[in-house]
Amino acid sequence: MKKYMFVMLAMSSCFILNAQRRGNNTDTAWKKIYRASATKINDLVHTKLDVKFDYDKSYLYGKEWVTLKPHFYPTDSLSLDAKGMDIKEISIMKGVSKSPLKYTYDGMMLNIHLDRTYKEGEKYTVYIDYTSKPNEVKAQGSAAISDAKGLYFINPKGEDKTKPAQIWTQGETEANSVWFPTIDKPNQKTTEEIYMTVPAKYVTLSNGLLVSQKKNADGTRTDYWKMDLPHAPYLFFMGVGEYSIIKDHLKNGKEVAYYVEKEYATVARKIFGLTPAMIECFEKLTGVPFPWAKYDQIVGRDYVSGAMENTTATLHQESAYQNARQLVDGNRWEDVISHELFHQWFGDYVTTESWSNITLNESFADYGETLWLQCHYGNDYGDEHIEGNRRSYISGGQGNAQKDLVRFYYHDKEDVFDGVSYPKGGAILHMLRNYVSDDAFFKSLNKYLTDNKFKSAEAHNLRLAFEEVTGKDLNWFFNQWYFSNGHPKLNINYNYGNGTTQVIVEQKTDKTWKLPVAIDIYNGANKTRYQVWVQNKIDTFTFNTPTKPDLVNFDGDKTLLVDKTDNKTADNFIHQWKYAPLYMDRYEALNYFSKNKMKELAEGLNDKYRGLKEFTLDKLADNTSLVTGDVLTKVEKLANGGSDKKVTAAALDILVKMKDKKYVPLFVKMVNDSSYTVAGAAFEGLNDLDPDDAFKAAKGLASDAKGKLGQLITGVIMAKATEADFDFIYNQYKNAPLNEAKLQLSATFASYLAGLKDAAKIKKGVEAIMVFRNVIPEEYRGFTDPSFKQAFSKITAAKSDNKELVDYINGLIK
């Protein structure tokens, strides 16, 4: 699962792109509760479902035939997770006949007394007739999953004319047992059949292959989906709605398809069309062919998370939808697509045996994003992604540093989906790959996948696979990075003299880390590499150097997950920029030049990688005193357009800060660019220099304005809008992306609301602001809530004579 939430940190103005845990809980009893893998008494074997949907009541009427067998010990009972259901009948199947069974049910667990004692390996099938009532289930979700009701009816009665009627399911972690009784644990696996009866106008999607479709006399149709290979119950999926199905194929003929709403049919391939190439990449790297019969992707309205890797049928939230102009800037959803796809190997083919071991799912899926970028675009793209992981994890502070990667103690199973399991886990895999070598890393992954296929696993299975391939004992690595917490903090100093160079590494944490490190010593373009181990509080490494080196490059492969203070000189970093080849070498140098306001920062405009050009432009925007002469000429050239729209927009951002009237013609031209990002940057410049013309242009541009362009236009129009413009203003604010710009836009929107007379419109607007406020995790609201309170105070001050309205708004604030 890729849980996406853009969290605004007002103090640092940076975004964290990961699920965040729920707010601090004063209950600490969980710290003594060991979260073991679920005990296996019975094993799922096969699950057959026959379901119908009641759109008026949001019910599912289900019949289930679940086949099981005792895991080892004989048993005469069966316990199934079955949340909030009406149970009508439970029987044991004897051929085609049924014999009623006794059972007890508390609304969550279904405890069934079998007709006799069954022994190991002896299969039996239980029949259950039930009604699922997902909207009546009270199940707590997490910061990234707003609830856990398993089955979702979206606009089932068609009351919202702006939204299609859809049904989709969300099983992770243990919510699929809201819509069918099962042993809802990740260490269970079962094959599957589903008969889904739906109105004939809808298409359906589920796991496995669509075997048949049957038209019914009542205007419905029954689709039969079959999954011949076993997978975990949380990966079961149903999707229903009016979709266009865009079909693709792998080289071996397996079908790949994209289920999108009709208006996105023309861009579906631009959004999802790299999927076959991704599969080919992952097959080549792992040595394991795509293990399933097909692979489909579907987009669901109002989906409660980012995306979910249901076996053969990934579900994406509607943020995946992008129009042709948005895609000009690049596919913002590509990382998510690769993430969910890699889960088909790591998570679906081999599944974590417990939520404590979620790293086996999520850290690999996160690293799958890096692998795809390297495969398709090159190492600079992958290195930038993994560095983003490191920064994301470290920016989480002590909250992240205190958590083990394999976590046997947690408050709630949802809490393990966080900035440790995702970005830290991906960065750890990158270190492991560097330590053992590429060949050994991917051969070890092949062994892990092959040895554990269609099974569940724990982190030790991964360790053992690596140890068998490499012949190395890796307990030290796994104990340090998987079964413990935190990360090294290093202070690195250098001494030169008497024909030697010393590298002094001091560890600044209470724990002492063991780190294999490459140290590269440069003289001009010539590099000599030394392999060392950092493993003491202070390590001093001495090298014979007849002449003083131009650069000593600690961690020459730039793979360590460390918080380091590297006390190099400016000349060292200049040499690093010129001669050290990796993305991180150049990034570190440019970052140093920026912090020290050095003219060498502008060298980044000549970098071969677009990401570092954009980084350089962003830093120059903070140091405009460096933008003169030839540097300004280069920026102007980049601002006039090129192959990369984000680079163009970043160059325009610098010219906006210049506030020079000579750029008005450029801004006028670029405000009509095909890229929303470029057009948005140009519009900002036009608005700064000629606000009247910008306002005139705003309404003409508003009919097709998203992203930065849409937010800026909305702000300009809000400032001069009337009551009659409410619907436009409301929709622009409501649909704005969840980022820091929307936080700033909230104040402008509140000022607009304060000028309205219609209390119903004001309430509707205030509620939209609160919806946005409530997606921000509690631990960050200390930074953001003052902005919201200030925004609301504008309204309450303006409407002080309307006590009912003021009380309503104050109630929301409380």
Image (cartoon, grey):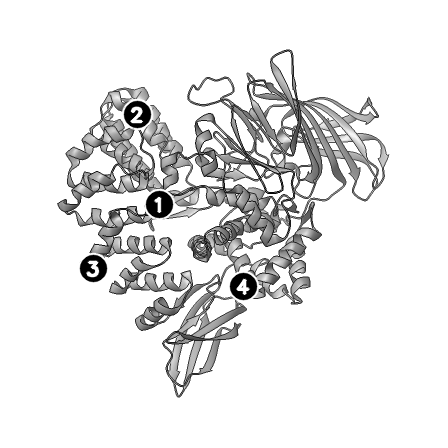
- The residue shown at (60%, 43%) is 344
The CA distance from mark 1 to mark 4 is 38 Å
Image quarter where the N terminus lies is top right
Mark whose residue sits in front, 4 or 2: 4
Q: Are marks 1 and 2 in contact (CB under 8 Å)?
A: no
Q: Position of residue 189 (x, y in %)?
A: 70, 40
- The residue shown at (42%, 37%) is 775
Residue indicated by mark 4: 434
The CA distance from mark 4 to mark 2 is 53 Å
The disc placed on residue 728 is 2
* Helix, strand or loop for disc 4: helix
- The residue shown at (23%, 31%) is 698
Of mark 4 and mark 3, the one earlier in the sequence is: 4
Of mark 1 and mark 2, the one earlier in the sequence is: 2
Residue 589 can be seen, yes or no: yes
Of mark 1 and mark 3, the one earlier in the sequence is: 3
Mark whose residue sits in front, 1 or 4: 4
Residue indicated by mark 1: 783
Mark whose residue sits in front, 4 or 3: 3
The CA distance from mark 4 to mark 3 is 40 Å
Amino acid under disc 1: Phe
Amino acid under disc 2: Phe
Residue 88 falls in image quadrant: top right
